[in-house]
Amino acid sequence: MNEMINAVILGIVEGLTEFLPVSSTGHMIIVGHMIGFQGDLAQIFDIVIQLGAILSVLVLYRQRFARFLTREGWQVDKGLSGFHIMAGCVPTMLFALLIHSFIKKYLFSPFTVAVGLVLGALLMIFAEQKIRGHEDELVQDVDHISLKQAFGIGFYQFLSLWPGFSRSGSTISGALMVGVSRKAGADFTFIMALPIMVAACLYELLKNLGSLSGNDFAVLAVGFVVAFIVAYFSILWFIGFLNRSTLKSFAIYRLLLAAFSLWYFYF
């Protein structure tokens, strides 16, 4: 029963934070330590519920992904194409292959998460200051993003490999830095994230399936479903929020969370 309760709690946390610029990995590490949900099952559980959250993107942007299966979906002059997604994915995928072991060994602790939360908050504040007074000049529609801008956003995505930085926080900030609006940057971020994250989750899952027992699958299923449902509505809310507000409120939240985690774990 305790594991089921943990599954629901962490499924909600993952669903709420996966696509908000607050770092889902950071929240999972902090909450996992607080409720004592750690070990082999916890590691696999984190992968499964992240996959559940990611698949909500496939449902919400299903028309976009269906278009990538057509010839038009790979024509650069016809709007967002498969080549834009590749341009955004390649920098992070290459970098992840190089430093994956280092990240797993040294960056998964409450302290390193707090550092990532602070650095990510500062990046978001800097990006907002950079575009102040120039918002009308930004690309407002994801279909108008250039290949160069897609690559630039993908370059900022590699910062999310540091737990606490946040994928959406890094990429939406990066979008602002290369001349793309928050809303268009968020749309591109969510679409671009799906192939990378599905590949990463399936890779980790296949590596660790052997350590699961029969009773573990029910816990994984509950977490998966909860994360999927919560992430679906979280994305809808966030897109609406970006139409009327900035990233600064999330930056403030990140700084407060970093201070709380340092106090809770180290003082």
Image (tube, rainbow, N blue to C red):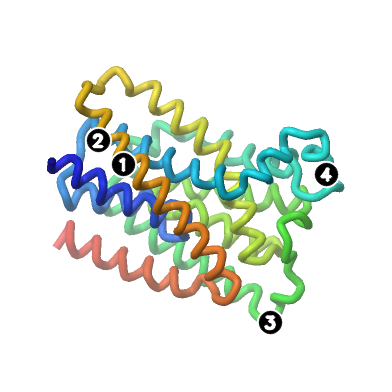
Q: Earlier in the sequence, mark 3 or mark 4?
A: 4
What amino acid type is highlighted by mark number 3? Gly
Tag 2 residue: 219
Q: Which mark is residue 223?
A: 1
Determine which residue is flagged by label 4: 76
Label 4, label 2: how far apart the Cα atoms are:
43 Å
Residue at left 52%, top 60%? 236
Distance between the alpha carbons at the discs numbered 3 and 4? 30 Å
| Dot in front, 2 or 3 | 2
Q: Residue at x 41, y 50 (%)?
A: 229
Q: Type of residue at label 2?
A: Val
Which x, y percent locates residue 261? 24, 61
Q: CA distance from mark 2 to mark 1?
A: 6 Å
Say whether marks 1 and 3 touch (CB < 8 Å): no
Dot 4 and dot 1 residues touching (CB under 8 Å): no
Left or right side of 95 for 104: left
Quarter of the image with the C terminus in it = bottom left
- Farthest-out residue, right: 77
Find the distance from the CA under tag 4 to the CA under tag 1: 38 Å
How far is the residue under mark 1 from the one under mark 3?
A: 43 Å
Q: Residues within 10 Å of mark 4 (few under 14, many from 20)?
A: some
Q: Earlier in the sequence, mark 4 or mark 1?
A: 4
First in residue order: circle 2 vs circle 3: 3
Q: Amino acid at mark 1?
A: Gly
Q: Residue at x 32, y 21 (%)?
A: 209
Q: Quadrant of residue 62?
A: top right
